[in-house]
Image (cartoon, rainbow, N blue to C red):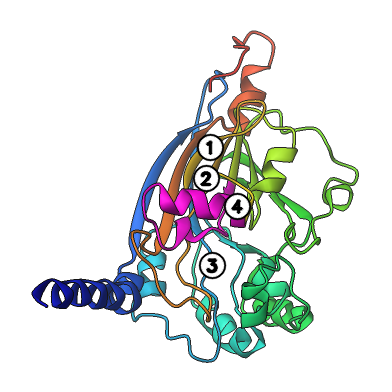
Amino acid sequence: MALTFLVVFVVLAVAFDAHRIEPRRLEVSRHSVDMRDGTPGEGRVRIVLVSDIHFHDRTRLPAGWIERINELGADLVVLAGDLIDDDSGIEACGGAFARLRARHGVFAVLGNHDHRHYKLDDFLRARRVPITRNDVSRLVDRLRAAGVDVMRNERREFEVDGVRVDLVGFDDAVTGEYDRERTFAGFAPPVDHGMRIFLTHWGGPAHRETSDPRTLGLSGHTHGGQVWIPFFSRAVLSRRLQSGQFRGWFGLPGGGRLYIGRGMGFARLAPFRLNASPEVAVFDVCATRAGDVREASQPGRAQTAGLRP
C-alpha cells in the first residue's frame, strides 16, 4: 500500500512539473561561433533563435519572456516556425512578435503547424501531414504588419558590423512547401566572405544544401524531444521524426553546422515538457568584415588564403 501511494505521488509530481512548472522555465543558451576565413579584420553578429511557440486561443505566454529576448541585444532575431498551432493563435502571435526588437530586423520561416492544423486523429494515425489547412495568408499578413520579415523560400543579403550576411529562409519541408529552385533562383554560390544562415523549421533542408565552414543552420521542430527520457525517447522519436537529431549541434556537409533549438512552447494536444525546458538560443558569430577583405586585396596589401573552421 505504501509503495503504491509512493508511485502515485511520484507520477503526479512529475506530471505537475511537466505541465505547470517546466514549460515556464525559460533557458537562454549561449554559443560562440567562429567563421573567420583567415583574412585580416573581423566583425561580430549576435543572432537570437526563437521557435515553436504554438500560439492558439488558450496560449498564455509567460510574463516577461518577450522582454527577456529584447534584453539580449540581438542584431537579428530569427523565428524558426511553428509560431501558431491553429488559426485561433494568429492575433496573439502577431501581437507578441510586434514587441520583439532587433537592430537589423526580425525574420521568420513557417513550420508544419503554421500550414496545417493537427487534430487528435492525426496524432493517433501518426499523420505527418494532416488534412486541415490553416489560413497561412492571414498569418503572414499579420506577421508582416507586426514588422516580421516572413521568408518563404527567399533570401536576404545585408551587412551587420561590416559582415556580409546571406540569410536563406526555407519554407516548411514537412508539409511539402520547401522549394529549393525558387530559393536560389539566380544566386547559387556561397558567400565569398562573411556568413550564410540557413533558417528552416525542420533541419532536413539544411543538410541538403551546399555549405562550407561559414554556414550556420538554425532550426527547431523537435522541441528537444519535449519529453526526454534517456534511451526510451530516442528510440520512440527516431521513428516518429524519421531522424536521430533532436537538439543541439550537428555537422553539415562541407563543414557548416546546424543547431536544433528546443523551442519555447508545445502543441495544444501535448501540453507538457519534461527534461526539455523552453529555450532561446543566442549565437555570437565572429566573421570576416567585407570592408577588411576589400582593403586587404588592394595592391601592396597582404592577402591570406584558406578557411578556418
Q: Residues within 10 Å of mark 3 (few under 14, many from 20)?
A: many
Residue 250: mark in rendering: 1
Q: Camera-side residue: 150 or 204? A: 204
> In screen coordinates, is 9 left or right of 196?
left
List x then y, in percent, for residue 149: 68, 66
List x then y, in percent, for residue 307: 59, 18
At 47% from the left and 85% from the top, the residue drawn is 59
* Residue 306 in view of the camera: yes
Q: Secondary structure at mark 1?
A: strand
List x then y, in percent, for residue 61: 42, 81
Q: Is residue 232 magenta?
A: yes
The image quadrant where one finds the N terminus is bottom left
Which residue range is magenta in the image? Answer: 218-240
Please name the residue that numbered disc 3 is placed on.
52
Q: Earlier in the sequence, mark 4 or mark 3?
A: 3
Q: Secondary structure at mark 3?
A: loop
Q: Is residue 90 magenta?
A: no
Q: Camera-side residue: 93 or 237? A: 237
Q: Earlier in the sequence, mark 4 or mark 2?
A: 4
Q: Secondary structure at mark 4?
A: helix
Residue 239: mark in rendering: 4
| Three-letter residue code for mark 3 | Asp
Residue 132: mark in rendering: none
Rounded to the nearest angstrom, the CA distance separating label 3 from label 1 is: 19 Å
| Three-letter residue code for mark 2 | Tyr
Q: Earlier in the sequence, mark 3 or mark 2?
A: 3
Looking at the image, is mark 1 or mark 4 nearer the viewer? 4
As displayed, is residue 181 above or below residue 76? above
Q: Earlier in the sequence, mark 3 or mark 1?
A: 3
Residue 259: mark in rendering: 2
At 49% from the left and 76% from the top, the residue drawn is 270
